[in-house]
Image: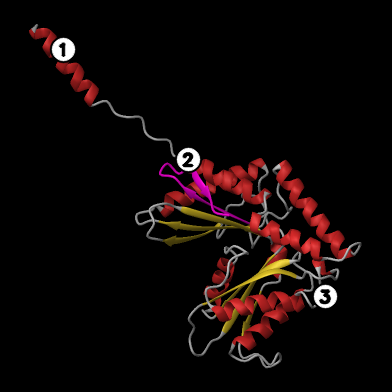
Amino acid sequence: MANKKVTNKKATKKKATKKKAPQKDHLFDSILELVRKTSAEIPGDVQKVILEALEREEKNTTAEYAMNIIKANIDLAKKKSQPICQDTGTILFFVNHPVGFNQTAFTKVVHKAVVKATEKGYLRQNSVDSLTGKNETMNIGPGHPDIHFHEHNKKHVEIRLMLKGGGCENVGAQYSLPHTDLGAGRDLDGVRKVILDAVQKAQGKGCGPGVLGVTIGGDRGAGYVNSKEQLLRKLDDTNSHPDLAALEKDIVETSNELGIGPMGFGGKTTLLDCKIGALNRLPASYFVSISYMCWAYRRLGVTLKNDNAIKDWLY
């Protein structure tokens, strides 16, 4: 009996000290799926506005034809799970995370996922060495992908991804007020004048109709970053600042009266939306930074579970 009791104690002790298998971390798979879906699918709030624009154009016009091509492109890319545009764009991650988050480890996983996404064809190899012009790094290099980290008080991680094409990036602009040639002073009327000037100068370039992200104030760098962050907003939201909400609406309505139209072919839809934010500035400076997003508005996001599997889609 004594031997049996000893044996049972040993068995119990062995059972108690048995380690559990480590939980699988799904971060790589989650980022890869986020990249795939962002590249191939337009978010619902954007598609809704595009379809409304199609209905607004006059029948049997070049504008309607252009909007129908855009619609067909959207449908085909989603059906085939292939990039909606041959320019899969600058890869921009915006990550909201809790205290203690390991940014270095996260960045390493993002790089691996971007390489795999490029190998699979979710992304084209668009990132080139600025000095040599060589295109051989599978979208990994200094500043690419571009990852912006923000700490928040929530316990979960939120990842938003934007794929921003080079054509629309080319027609972004930054103005310093006052602007004598445009008669634009340091007020919201002056801001309005320079935004409309940027729309007029774009003339359908950058694959319009598009969406503007605008930031009033900040320094030159912060203004441009924040103008891109405005593009993370949903198109059906309302600016919390009433003056900016009114300006957003006015910019869209006025731009669509210019007759530039889809792809610059003429028509009723030059802009799909405009989102405006404001940052503090120095008294000596008054910048207005404008980021343009093309109709191929690739912006999606996810929240993650504790094991980094996808919990919810944000758009």
Magenta span contains residue 143: no
Question: What residue sits right under mark 2 in the picture?
Answer: 26
Q: Earlier in the sequence, mark 3 or mark 2?
A: 2
| Mark 2: secondary structure | loop
Q: Seen from this angle, which residue lies furthest right?
A: 60
Query: Residue flagged by tag 3: what amino acid is it?
Result: Gly
Q: Give the alpha-carbon distance from disc 1 to disc 2, as whole Å.
A: 41 Å
Query: Residue flagged by tag 1: what amino acid is it?
Result: Thr
Residue drawn at (78%, 56%) of the image: 70
Q: Quadrant of residue 274?
A: bottom right
Quadrant the N terminus occupies:
top left
Residue drawn at (13%, 8%) of the image: 4
Q: Earlier in the sequence, mark 1 or mark 2?
A: 1
> Does residue 133 appear in the picture of this structure?
no
| Mark 1: secondary structure | helix
Question: What residue sits right under mark 1 in the picture?
Answer: 7
Q: Seen from this angle, which residue lies furthest left?
A: 2
The local crowd at label 3, few if under 14, some if 14 to 19, many if 20 or more residues have their Cα within 10 Å, is: some
Query: Which residues lie in the magenta part?
Result: 299-315
Question: What residue sits right under mark 3 in the picture?
Answer: 259
Q: Nearer the viewer, mark 3 or mark 2?
A: 3
The local crowd at label 1, few if under 14, some if 14 to 19, many if 20 or more residues have their Cα within 10 Å, is: few
Magenta span contains residue 304: yes
